[in-house]
Image (cartoon, rainbow, N blue to C red):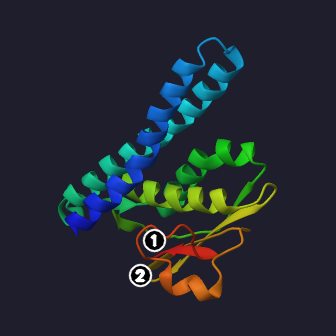
């Protein structure tokens, strides 16, 4: 698992690192052209933000692997976790004219790490938002009964063609199914 993780991370980090290197060279070569410098600098900023997000994901994954939920977990209100995850996606959704609609409720708390649960839901919402067309809707539906809690996240994106569904979880696959659920 660690070997696969290192391969995956190396692959993901190479793209923004390579782009940053090329963009810095382009800025140096275009030093006299202010428009080109601004263009390359904006691209450089986007790639650095992408790199920063990847590093943050690695830090969160390390933290998740190091956390003993049985020993350190607490009762978590999933309604609150979902609200926080939605709030963290609002600005990006509004920039793309995407609505995030939340429905349902989960009355029973779950046992876990509240920060990691918020991160997981935030990532799923972010993914749904990323694949939604401008003006689309991301739906987050909470449900639960007895000892079950379910969060369904669905978007208006194109989804994965049925012939590709078997490969969704292969390494470096770039699409995902129409709806994503976190049980």
Q: Which percent across, then down, holds residue 37?
A: 62, 20
Number of numbered labels in the structure image: 2
What residue is shown at x 75% (from left), y 48% (from top)? 96
Query: Gap between marks 1 and 2, in whole Å?
Result: 8 Å
Taking the image as drawn, is residue 183 in sight? yes
In this rendered view, identify the residue nearer to me: 56 or 8: 8
If the image is split into quadrants, where does the N terminus sit? Answer: bottom left
Counting from the top left corner in percent of width and height, residue 39 is at: 66, 27
Secondary structure under tag 2 reads loop
The disc label shown at residue 108, or none: 1
Above or below for 83 versus 18: below
Horizontally, residue 60 falls left or right of residue 3, namely: right
Q: Residue at x 60, y 52 (%)?
A: 86
Asked which secondary structure carries label 1, the reply is loop
Instruction: Return the mark for residue 179.
Output: none
- At 56% from the left edge and 46% from the top edge, which residue is drawn? 88
71 and 168: which is toward the camera: 168
Q: Earlier in the sequence, mark 1 or mark 2?
A: 1
Point out the residue furthest to the top here.
32
User: How packed is label 1: few (under 14 Cα within 10 Å), some, or many (20 or more)?
Assistant: some
Which residue reaches farthest front? 29
Count neighbours of disc 2 (C-alpha within 10 A) and say few if under 14, some if 14 to 19, many if 20 or more.
Answer: few
Q: What residue did someone put label 2 on?
A: 147
Horizontal placement of 156 versus 126: left or right? Answer: right
> Residue at point 60% right, 19% down?
30
> CB atoms at circles 1 and 2 under 8 Å apart?
yes
Can the viewer see residue 48? no
From the top left corner, tell me how far across and down residue 144 is, in percent.
Answer: 52, 78
From this view, report whether residue 62 is shown above or below residue 47. Answer: below
Q: Nearer the viewer, residue 99 or 28?
A: 28
- Place of residue 120 in the rendered image (x, y in percent of width and height, measured from the top left): 45, 60
The quarter holding residue 113 reads bottom left
């Amino acid at each position: 698992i660690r070997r696969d993780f290192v391969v995956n991370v190396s692959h993901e980090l190479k793209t923004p690192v390579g782009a940053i290197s090329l963009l810095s060279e382009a800025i140096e070569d275009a030093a006299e052209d202010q428009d080109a410098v601004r263009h390359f600098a904006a691209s450089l900023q986007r790639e650095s933000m992408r790199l920063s997000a990847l590093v943050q994901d690695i830090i969160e994954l390390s933290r998740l692997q190091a956390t003993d939920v049985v020993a350190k977990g607490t009762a978590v209100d999933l309604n609150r976790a979902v609200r926080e995850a939605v709030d963290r996606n609002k600005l990006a959704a509004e920039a793309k004219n995407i609505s995030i609609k939340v429905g349902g409720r989960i009355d029973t708390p779950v046992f876990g790490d509240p920060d990691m649960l918020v991160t997981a839901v935030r990532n799923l919402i972010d993914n749904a938002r990323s694949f939604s067309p401008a003006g689309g809707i991301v739906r987050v539906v909470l449900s639960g009964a007895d000892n079950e809690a379910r969060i369904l996240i669905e978007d208006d994106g194109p989804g994965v063609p049925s012939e590709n569904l078997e490969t969704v979880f292969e390494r470096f696959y770039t699409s995902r199914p129409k709806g994503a659920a976190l049980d």
